[in-house]
Amino acid sequence: MYGLWKDNLLDFNTLLLTTYKELGLNEQEYVLLVLLARLLKTNPSGWTFSDISTHMTIDEANCSVLFINLVERQYITVSSKMDERGKRFEEYSIAPLFEKIETLLRQQKTQATSTQREEIFSMIEQEFGILSPLDIETIHLWMTEDNFDPELIKLAIREMNSYQIKSIRYIDKILLDWKKKNIKTVEEAKRQLIAFRQRKQSSMTTETQTVSVDPNFYYDWMNE
């Protein structure tokens, strides 16, 4: 992530805006880091705290205090370097900040995944009651080895119910069929289901020479 920022491939301001509170930063620290990040890109060795305070509501001295506090809390690193002429200089880096952001995002993803898995198991238990070890293993594989989107699994469960079938194997069949067709999102699956129903209805109409339609034939996936 730090490399992406250095290559101008990452919107740092938005990334920090959406994570600074969870990172333990306040609004002043957020603004200081945004300004510092810009200066490290445009003038890495020539910036001053005056350059930062000009765009903040605090003076240069308080900017310095904020900066030191961020260094102590390991959001910023300061390293002593020597140039080709043997002159020492200070090098500043916000790489530790990116490490903290990456750790936070991983934790959030893990927590979200755990919650989604609990929702899937709860939803299926409501449909089938107590699950067998084989059923539990099958569901676990959907979310780990097959890596199906939890919302896609929920859609497969609702698709099973639309046919008034109660079978884990049927859900598994639906998901594997979508996997073979490289369907990865709920939107793609809904489009495929609607297209299938339309083709089937067209075939039925041709065969019977009638336009009568079973009101239960179309499942309103798009507006459920």
Image: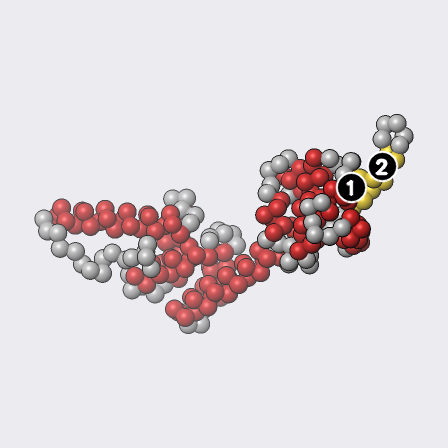
Give the labeled residue for mark 2.
89
In depth, the one of 212 and 145 nearer the eye is 212
Rendered residue at 28%/58% (across/down): 219
The outermost residue toward the left is 209
Left or right side of 41 for 87: right
Q: Is residue 101 visible?
A: yes
Give the labeled residue for mark 1.
48
| Residue 112: numbered disc | none
Asked if 184 appears above or below 120 in the picture, the reply is above
- Within-10-Å neighbours for mark 1: few <14, some 14–19, many 20+: some
The outermost residue toward the top is 85
Q: Secondary structure at mark 2?
A: strand
- Three-letter residue code for mark 1: Thr
- Within-10-Å neighbours for mark 2: few <14, some 14–19, many 20+: few
The outermost residue toward the right is 86
Rendered residue at 29%/64% (across/down): 164
In depth, the one of 184 and 135 nearer the eye is 184
- Three-letter residue code for mark 2: Phe
Q: CA distance from mark 2 to mark 1?
A: 14 Å
Q: Mark 2 or mark 1: which comes first in sequence?
A: 1
Q: Position of residue 142 (x, y in %)?
A: 47, 55
Between marks 2 and 1 in the image, the one whose residue lies nearer the viewer = 1
Rendered residue at 23%/57% (across/down): 217
Rendered residue at 80%/51% (across/down): 61
Left or right side of 144 for 12: right
Q: Position of residue 55 (x, y in %)?
A: 68, 46
Quadrant of the drawing holding the C terminus: bottom left
